Amino acid sequence: MDLLQLKEVSIGYRRDRPLFAPISLTIRQGDLLGILGPNGAGKSTLVKTLLGLVPPLAGTVGLPLQRRPRLGYVAQGARPDFAYPLSVLQVTLMGRAAHLGLLKRPASADRALALAQLDAVGLAALAAAPFRSLSGGQQQRVLVARALTAEPELLVLDEPTSEMDPAAEHALLSLVSSLVASRNLAVMFVTHQISAAAGFASQVVLLDKAQRTVECGPTEALLTSARMSALYGRPVEIRRENGRALVWLSAGEPNVQGGAR
């Protein structure tokens, strides 16, 4: 089922200076869409346009459901730095805010839903632990659980692995990939990490700010060594072996081993 349809959409903040040529793109249930480009390429601006936070300069964002899909959103740098020790469960329950409003307290059904999402990300046993006591990778999993308590049809992750080592990145994106399969979600994740898109995305959007172009299509068709080398302005080699993607950012040892798809 289609969730969002971009038709000849121009994005940016000035009508006379769009960031790219017009974009046409459809987001469907079951998609795992990677939005890839160097730092400063306009990835977050594209996401904000899709979320309705920034109006398109031209074109239309179609709503096949006759409404915006229910969203779960983990913003870039969204990891809270609480001055007091909220528990993991309390942080997860924040995802119910849109359903509860400003004054209504979470009911037992909300707590049960939040615990179910913590179980889905493998952290139910830490529900009572202080959020700030968790590792960075665990905190990011909690934020994914918080987004899932909104019962989204589209889960949006903005640079979800930017501060993670390769093992933690692989673990989080493997989790996200399993959620797509088990819940028939659409997931859109923004990244500048070639390995993340190559290893996990089924579709990619490549943003080339220098050329002012956008390309959309299957990951294996677009994420080639030649295309990535041109996009990032440095030698990149991508190999696929036994269903896994290996990415070299320069001559020598592989930089990151992506996941299987």
Image: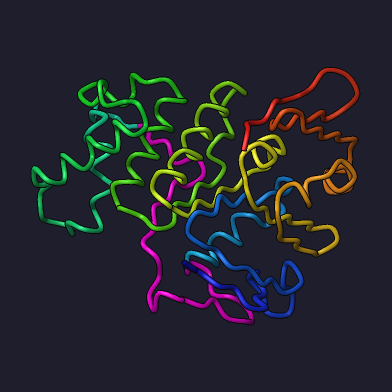
The quadrant in which the C terminus is found is top right
Q: Is residue 16 left or right of residue 102?
A: right
Please name the residue shown 59% across and 48% down the image.
190
Q: Nearer the viewer, residue 252 or 106?
A: 252
The image quadrant that residue 80 belongs to is top left
Position of residue 104 relative to residue 225, above or below, is below
Image x and y of residue 179, in percent:
43, 42
What colouring does the structure picture have? rainbow
Image x and y of residue 107, in percent:
9, 46
Furthest toward the front, the residue is 242
Position of residue 162 relative to residue 221, above or below, is above
**Span colored in magenta:** 52-81
Q: Is residue 48 left or right of residue 233?
A: left
Q: Is residue 80 magenta?
A: yes
Image x and y of residue 114, in percent:
23, 40
Q: Nearer the viewer, residue 102 or 151?
A: 151
Q: Is residue 116 magenta?
A: no
Q: How many marks?
A: 0
Position of residue 184 relative to residue 192, above or below, is below
Please name the residue shown 26% across and 26% down the image.
124
Looking at the magenta stretch, what is its main secondary structure?
Answer: loop
Image x and y of residue 195, in percent:
70, 34
Please name the residue shown 38% across and 38% down the image.
143
Position of residue 91 relative to residue 30, above or below, is above
Q: Is residue 239 left or right of residue 177?
A: right
Please name the residue shown 85% across and 61% down the image.
211
The image quadrant that residue 116 belongs to is top left
